[in-house]
Image: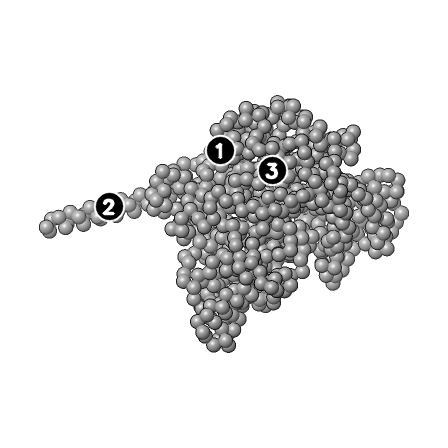
Amino acid sequence: MKKLIIMLLVVGVVGYAGWQMFNQAVLSGKMGSERLAGSPSAEAVPEAAIIARRVADQQVSPDPQGSKQILFGDLHVHSTYSTDAFLWSLPLNHGKGVHPVADACDYARYCSAIDFWSITDHAEAGTPTRWSRTKDAIRECQAKAADQSNPDLVSMLGFEWTQVGPVPSEHFGHKNVIFRDIEDDKVAARAIAAAGTATDTLRYSTSGLPAVVPMSDFKNRQNYYDFNTYLANIQAVPACDPDLPSSQLPSDCFESAKLPGDLIARLEDQGLDPLIIPHGSSWGFYTPPGTTWDKQLKSKHRPEKFPLVEVYSGHGNSEEYRDYTNVIADDPLEQSASCAPLQENYTPPCQRAGQIIEQRCLAEDRDAEECAALAATARKAAASMGVSYHLAVQGEKPEDWLDSGQCTDCYLPSFHHRPGTSVQYGLAVSNFDNEADPSRFNWGFIGSSDNHRARPGTGYKEIARRLTTEAGGVVDPKYRPIFLPEEGAPDLKVHVKTRAELTALAGFQLTELERQSSFWQTGGLAAVHTEGRSREQIWDALQRRETFATSGPRMLLWFDRIDAEGNKAPMGATVEAQQSGRFKVHAVGSFKQNPGCPDYAVAALGEERIASLCSDECYNPAQERNLIQRIEIVRIQPQISSDEKIGDLIDDVFVSHQCEADQNGCSFEFEDPEFAANGRDTLYYARAIQEPRPTINGAPIQCERDEDGNCIKATLCLGDYRTPEDENCLSPKDVRAWSSPIYLNYTSAQPASS
């Protein structure tokens, strides 16, 4: 018996030691391999299909004999070379497997059938190997086009600079960096990351998945092994010397830039002048409450280098300004804040935190004064914890937050929409460091998908929520602690966390990840008015801001200003003027869609790949178009004094035109007689509204309301096991297109033509 016990102990010790060695091998990435970027499988789209697209648009153009055409693209796409994209691809997160760069090429050609696109994986996860493989995949994609002067698809190279600051003064947000060319000597030597806490956590503190995870999903174990290898390879790249100019760095180091101006300086040191496009600007998932555009107008941050802004994506709409307040900073260092009061159509989340605690307290028959005091403590704690306010309350469910923190009267708003970083706010604010020449943003508008499953241009049909949006979450509650804090039982204690304690938490544990799932939509599109299909012509249109955004479908939009002599200035133009001139708008609805895919797409990809990549549904236009219901004009008069309130400068809506039902679209003209009388710079943009369609998360939070209109019960569309995998969460919602603004700079001098 004694020998048996000794033998069992030895086996146990050896087994434990073996498991520990195995676990360490899994954690260190030794069991996996680095993923490839892949090779595109499909050849170029048949020329007849490309010609048919242009002919169809010319038939409804206000200038059918004109030389310009409208092309559609997506300049914001991620593959599993992005950390969050890799996480969402894992089977435990309802993931469908690998989504390499090459998938995006085939998807753009035949599933969404767009004209141009760019890969923009997060630079923070970049390695020399991944950058090299990405470049090769983009070049292979471009090489599929037989005629490079008139290609079926233009593929661009880019990366995302993913900056996150813990407090408003340190937050500058995310920027996509897009290069015109794809040759080695015309693009960055390395993808340049955003320096800071988020990047440091990924590179120095994030550990791999323990062996228990792949063992619990044994048939998919290689996915988890590869993810750990992916992390290990990020952490193996040495940091570049921050004191060396970018052009003098070795090719095999990890380069980063702390501020937007630093990023631009590093690119310029390499002799590069890419497009740098802010995006997701009002997305409160990571943007601290109270953040505004103001600081980014300082000259050191180079605001003139941002010619475009992403007004809409699958992460929501960043357009609209609202005069509501979330928190009130208590000190200049922004280390603490007070909760803003309840406002019309807006409940600050810190107020809801107090309500939850007070309701729990009263349910225990506690003294009302005691409950009120606990609620006050909860409000203060939640306000001071920024985007992590929800951690102040333990044991709550996503639904418990109701519609707090959300813009309840915005069009498909981004989660926790931050009005101070909305596009309208950015267009209205000025910087007066140089009073004689105030600094302002002069953006053109684009839309994008921000898809993390290598699927550019997803908004053509409202299908496959878990592939065409960012919906994701664990398939079983046992996996939840891998990504989110352990859920405790509901209690009355307010769980106050300092900045240091919050910083110590990893990644998504800081954010309200679960409720966010209800705000994911399919992506938007960038549209350009261009003389042709070449890379150079598309690039020129982007540079001159002759662009517009859509919320996904291929609406057509023209917006021009015509002066007294008949000279025309298109959307995106800046004009010196004494009179407003006459503005002309023409909008045409997108084509209704046939089910399935065109024959040429099936022939190119094959039925199996059509099913796996396109979810059996492609851009497949019918003969009938959707109808434009109305066209709205927004007027913004940028600040001429820092004392002017932003809300007083935004006229939304300035003019509204109701449209008759017409397959050929809707047109109208207007003037602004107040322009000359006001004598100040003014900008105008057009917003076309198309008839509603069933939309994924068209109603992000479905509220049951009391007689006063207050939300008392919320229904959410979650990404995890609590919402069925095949549920698309459809609600009717209209479709929109936004023109780039026309900027009128008022001049008292008589111009050559006015």
Per the image, the residue denoted by label 1 is 612
Q: Is residue 184 visible?
A: no
Looking at the image, tell me whether mark 3 or mark 1 is earlier in sequence order: 3
Give the residue displayed 59% in from the left and 57% down from the top.
406
Q: Between residues 97 and 521, which one lies in front from this camera angle?
A: 521
Select label 2 or label 3 by which is in front.
3
Give the residue displayed 77% in from the left and 31% down from the top.
64
What color scheme is it? one colour
Residue 394: % across, % down: 45, 62
Numbered mark located on residue 549 in the image = none
Q: For the residue marked with disc 3, what is the amino acid?
A: Tyr
Residue 55: % across, % down: 71, 28
Q: CA distance from mark 2 to mark 1?
A: 41 Å
Q: Quadrant of residue 222?
A: top left
Q: CA distance from mark 3 to mark 1?
A: 17 Å
Select label 2 or label 1 by which is in front.
1
Q: Is residue 12 left or right of residue 610?
A: left
Contact check, label 2 and label 1, Cβ < 8 Å? no
Contact check, label 3 and label 1, Cβ < 8 Å? no
Q: For the residue marked with disc 2, what is the amino acid?
A: Gly
* Disc 2 secondary structure class: helix
Residue 435: % across, % down: 76, 57
Give the residue displayed 50% in from the left and 42% down from the top.
466
Per the image, the residue denoted by label 3 is 460
Numbered mark located on residue 15 in the image = 2
State how many labels appear. Answer: 3
Q: Residues within 10 Å of mark 3 (few under 14, many from 20)?
A: many
